Image: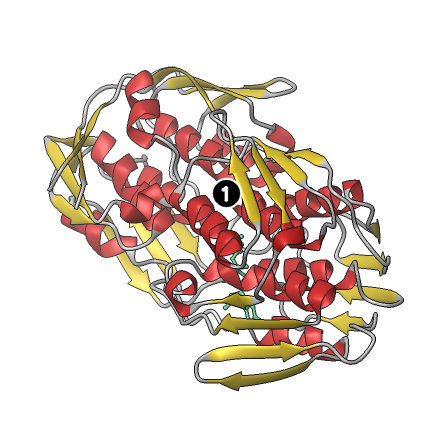
Amino acid sequence: MDKLLITGGGPLRGEIRISGSKNSALPILAATLLAETPISLSNLPHLNDITTMLSLLRCMGVNVTVDERMRVEIDASTIRCYEAPYELVKTMRASILVLGPLLSRFGEADVSFPGGCAIGSRPVDIHLRGLEAMGAHIEVDGGYIRARAPDGGLRGARFLMDKVTVGGTENLLMAAVLANGHSVLENAAREPEIVDLANCLVSMGAKIKGIGTDRLEVEGVSSLKGCEYSVMPDRIEAGTYLCAAAATRGSIKLKDTHADSMESVLIKLQEAGAELEVGENWIRLDMHGQRPQGVSLRTAPHPAFPTDMQSQFMAMNAVASGASKVTETIFENRLIQVHELNRMGANIALEGNTALITGVERLKAAPVMASDLRASASLVIAGLVADGETLIDRIYHIDRGYECIEEKLQLLGADIRRVAG
Ligand code: UD1
């Protein structure tokens, strides 16, 4: 199993390109099931989760062609089966996103029930209740969600999500675009990735109003066609590199990224003392060699501070001046990185879903273990600011969400390499 070896040192400096968004690409790949003619997608990141989603489409009989620039053409007209098997769903929970499209276009779907994961129990009850409101009959049998549309297909419905859910909003939106009649999704998630999915669906011929708001109105259409679509830049990848630069007192420029999808993160970086400059598709951060200030934050649905950036800020706070408080409100077990950071000399106490951080001057290298995708990113940041060599084990978690992380950090001057273990 590969490991990452990082020798902590000086500030990150330089320029890198941000990849396409994983969390936008996954639902858009699921949405290709809705189109009657081929869809061509560009700016897909080169990541294990994307490969898993492409394998899932292929195992249903969908025709997938990938060219050398990772532009992917997907033709769902060759589909033969409507099942997402356990072997694939267990490696990637986002496989649940094929449920809505399969059910609305083909009237049936058998999707392995996703289990919990390291960061929490992660139920899918809202996805299922929303589909039932559209007339679906759903049974859980043998570990599978077996869903069937009524005769004549799903019916448009008004559905209020009692909790803001990103995946639930995406699944129900993809079901509603081909349902008969009008749907209203209330208390919808507003994450930029949902806007990206909705814009792609509109390019395919869907009729959606309220994009970017918490009330999505959909007028079902009888069919959708293929289109060409470029996936948005990954705001979490961008935020991770900015955080790493702030923690190391560096100065970096990110290309192919959009500052307007990252407002809450940029505000916190400024509060930490970063000077920011933004252009149409770039962001520059400069710490002027200064140590960051600790910043307190609380995660919540968009446009508030994203849970996917919480652990990276905690790593920065661990070496910042002053005390700070980080509260996680989305997932019940998402402060797991605290124990590994403390093994590296951080001073972090846990009180329920809040971490109380007292910044220290430097961390000390130690062998550590990645436990989930974003927690792993915090260990990389910690390794960059630690004295000595940090060896991070189980980096398959990192590879699920960060394209070429060691190459990009090397471009920024970091001493990091992958070692076979
Ligand atoms: C997505 C993102 C993930 C991000 C998360 C929150 C993808 C592939 N993943 O995950 O990176 O951390 O949004 O921004 O886009 N919940 C229920 N019932 C449901 C659905 C969700 O109780 O039916 C709960 C979850 O357990 C969690 C909260 O709602 O506590 C938010 O989860 P959700 O927004 O659905 O996260 P995902 O879509 O799984």
Q: Quadrant of residue 125?
A: bottom right
Q: Position of residue 294 (x, y in %)?
A: 38, 39
Above/below status of 386 relative to 26: above
Residue toward you, 56 or 396: 56
Residue toward you, 3 or 81: 81
Question: In this orientation, does residue 294 appear?
Answer: yes
Q: Quadrant of residue 170?
A: bottom right
Residue at figure coordinates x 36%, y 68% from the top left? 352
Residue toward you, 269 or 76: 76
Task: Count the labels in the image.
Answer: 1
Above/below status of 93 relative to 135: above
Residue at figure coordinates x 82%, y 50% from the top left? 206
Q: Position of residue 123 (x, y in %)?
A: 50, 73
Q: Quadrant of residue 241?
A: top left
Question: In this orientation, does residue 297 appear?
Answer: no
User: CB at mark 1 closer than 8 A to ligand 1?
Assistant: yes
Q: Dot 1: few (<14), some (14–19), or many (≥20) neighbours within 10 Å?
A: many
Q: Seen in the image, is 174 located left or right of residue 26?
A: right
Q: Position of residue 18 (x, y in %)?
A: 48, 27
Q: Secondary structure at mark 1?
A: helix
The amino acid marked with disc number 1 is: Lys
Residue that carries the numbered disc 1 in the rendered image: 22
Above/below status of 360 relative to 174: above
Residue at figure coordinates x 39%, y 60% from the top left? 354
